[in-house]
Amino acid sequence: MNIALVSYSDKGAYDSETVESEDQRLLTFLQEKGLSVEMVIWNDPQVNWENYQLAILKSPWDYFDLINDFHQWLNHLEQKKVRLLNPIDVVRWNTDKKYLKEIEAAGLDITPCSFINRNEQVNLSDFFKFYHTDKLIVKPCVSGGAKNTFKITFENAGEVSKKLNFLVQDEDFIVQPFLPEIVENGEWSFIFFNGVYSHSLIKKAKAGDFRVQPAHGGSVHPQNPSPEVIQKAAAYVNLFAKNCLYARVDGTFVNEKFLLMELELIEPFLFLNTDPLNYERYYRASKELI
């Protein structure tokens, strides 16, 4: 079986050094295990996808900038009968953060959220009142890497509203109350391989920032959570990430309740380097699904 480990064309917009380190080490590990796998750029027009029986999404980090192309690519894989991990229908669902409402409807806790639809007039004061807060987070429904993400206060609401009223002409946005727990305690990430818990960590923003991504100066702190905490994170995977090679459950604890921020099923960084056994767990999960 020929396997494509799917990445993106690096144009310097993302944390390339970090992703290349994890991607290259994983590729080498899987090849040394005897898998016929090679790194492939998802939108490289020279790629003949008929040469692959399986494609594993690893780091298509620019998919949200090229979302229409990405959906066409998913359709192309389907037509060519190339099996994708994670499954194509799950990936389609996960591209738009409106999936959070579906998770909430299933009875699982999420960070409270509202949506600004495309071409809708933005009035941020309504959200301050609705959430009884003086700080908001606003970002596109199709996004990643903190792109067009704003932390909004009473002081900058007017300025940001002008930007949003321009941006919302092209896409939908999600609005959430800012959770101070993210700055105080960090954002948890729980990583699962084929539904089985592998490892977890807390991401913390650098002083004066709210973005926890390493590309923005965030730091990573491996954790050893209790079985009860792992079980809370696993509930999201069990319901919404069936047959997925990997899933990353991101959230934080507010008054001891875990609130999901995002269920990452497309291109999450997996922090494999936090434990040498993570690569082995990834391999074993892939063998189970192959």
Image (cartoon, rainbow, N blue to C red):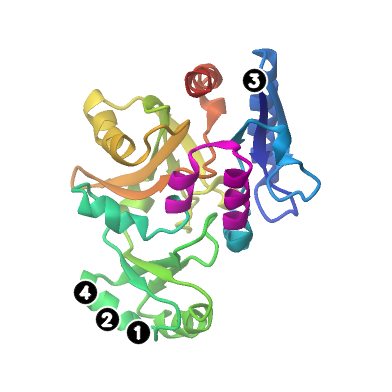
Q: Which residue is mark 2?
A: 126
Label 3 vs label 2, nearer the camera: 3
Residue at image mark 1: 123
Instruction: Report how far apart the C-alphas of labels 4 and 2 lie in the structure.
Output: 6 Å
Badge nearest the viewer, 4 or 3: 3
Label 1 vs label 4: CA separation? 12 Å
Along the polypeptide, which appears first: circle 1 or circle 3? 3
Find residue 249 and name its label: none
Residue 136 position within the rendered picture, expressed as x and y whole percent measured from the top left: 35, 68
48 relative position to 190: left or right? right
Q: Is 146 or 98 nearer to us in this picture?
A: 98
The magenta stretch spans which residues? 70-93
The quarter of the image holding the N terminus is: top right
What's the residue at 55%, 19% (across, down)?
283
In the picture of the structure, the residue carrying the numbered disc 4 is: 130
Q: Amino acid at mark 4?
A: Phe
Asked if the residue under mark 2 is in contact with the one under mark 4, i.e. CB atoms within 8 Å, the reply is yes
Badge 1 crowding class, 10 Å Cα cut-off, few under 14, some 14 to 19, many 20 or more, is: some
Q: In this picture, is 206 found above or below 56?
A: below
Question: What residue is shown with label 3?
Answer: 30
Tag 2 secondary structure: helix
Q: Earlier in the sequence, mark 4 or mark 3?
A: 3
Dominant secondary structure of the residues highlighted in magenta in the image = helix
Q: Quadrant of residue 221?
A: top left
